[in-house]
């Protein structure tokens, strides 16, 4: 059994102060799934994923809506063929041959954790995500922020305000990765200390 690890993805812990915003007029509201422990999710997937599927550690990325599972596949012997095409073919074969099993695991995980499951695979330097959620996020912006989005639309960087906002979030994620990682680690440490504290009951 391969050891499972979590990808360093934005807000990928499934925990933290945002997960406790239910019923306070903040966050996603009453329909938000409960927070999850990273180790518990990793252990569950370690027990459910067949040993033969992946050639190394699986990356698990978790937010409040989705669990993404990405595993590495063994590189095929391309011989005289194109190596990139061989990797793409290996990923396509894995996707087709494991579809029913992956659906069963996803259904069980959704029932247990209240989150959809997306799958992906890597082979060499080729990475492919099969299905992922596109979740609408409601926000209120004042005129200066709206002008930023409109500038991106008018310049042809994005086709709409929502696409411009997604572009801006991706840009922040790329350029502030170290800071975001430090922030996530700090919030995780706070959660662990709080969990070890005295309980009223």
Image: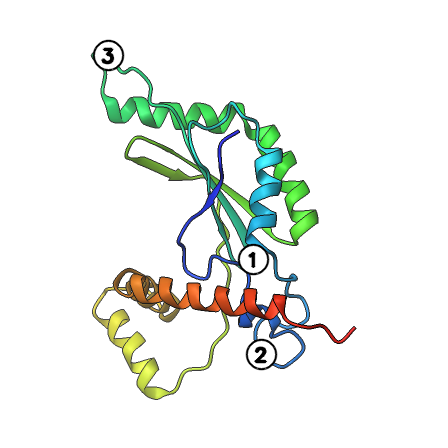
Q: Quadrant of residue 158?
A: bottom left
Which residue occupies the foreground of this view, 106 or 72? 72
Report the residue that reaches farthest toward the bottom: 143
Q: Secondary structure at mark 3?
A: loop
Which residue occupies the foreground of this view, 96 or 157? 96
Q: Is residue 77 left or right of residue 27?
A: left
In the image, residue 113 sits, relative to residue 195, either above or below, namely: above
Residue carrying label 2: 26
Find the distance from the CA under tag 1 to the CA under tag 3.
42 Å
In the image, residue 116 sits, relative to residue 35, either above or below, namely: above
Q: Secondary structure at mark 1?
A: loop
Query: For the point 51% across and 22% down, which residue is it?
Result: 52
Q: Earlier in the sequence, mark 2 or mark 1?
A: 2
In the image, residue 6 sits, relative to residue 70, either above or below, namely: below
Do the CB atoms of the residues marked 2 and 3 lie less than 8 Å apart? no
- Callout 3 environment at 10 Å: few (<14), some (14 to 19), or many (20+)? few
Which residue occupies the foreground of this view, 181 or 163? 181
Find the distance from the CA under tag 2 to the CA under tag 3.
56 Å
Instruction: Name the disc covering residue 79, or none.
Output: 3
Residue 157, image x and y in percent? 24, 64
Find the distance from the CA under tag 2 to the CA under tag 1.
16 Å
Residue 97, image x and y in percent? 52, 23
Q: Quadrant of residue 22?
A: bottom right
Residue 187, image x and y in percent? 47, 68
Residue carrying label 1: 65
Residue 138, image x and y in percent? 50, 73
């Amino acid at each position: 059994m391969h050891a499972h690890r979590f990808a360093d993805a934005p807000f990928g812990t499934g925990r933290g102060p945002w997960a406790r915003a239910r019923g306070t007029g903040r966050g996603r509201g009453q329909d938000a799934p409960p927070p999850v422990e990273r180790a518990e999710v990793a252990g569950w997937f370690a027990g459910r994923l067949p040993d033969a599927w992946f050639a190394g550690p699986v990356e698990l990325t978790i937010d409040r809506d989705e669990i993404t599972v990405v595993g590495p596949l063994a590189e095929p012997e391309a011989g005289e063929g194109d190596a990139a095409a061989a990797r793409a073919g290996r990923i396509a074969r894995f996707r087709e041959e494991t579809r029913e099993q992956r659906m069963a695991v996803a259904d069980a995980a959704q029932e247990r954790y209240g989150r959809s499951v997306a799958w992906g695979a890597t082979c060499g330097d080729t990475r492919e995500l099969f299905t992922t959620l596109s979740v609408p996020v409601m926000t209120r912006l004042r005129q200066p922020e709206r002008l930023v989005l409109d500038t991106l639309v008018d310049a042809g960087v994005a086709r709409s305000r929502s696409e411009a906002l997604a572009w801006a979030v991706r840009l922040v994620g790329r350029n502030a990765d170290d800071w975001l990682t430090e922030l996530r680690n700090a919030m995780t440490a706070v959660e662990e200390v709080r969990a070890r504290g005295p309980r009223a009951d």
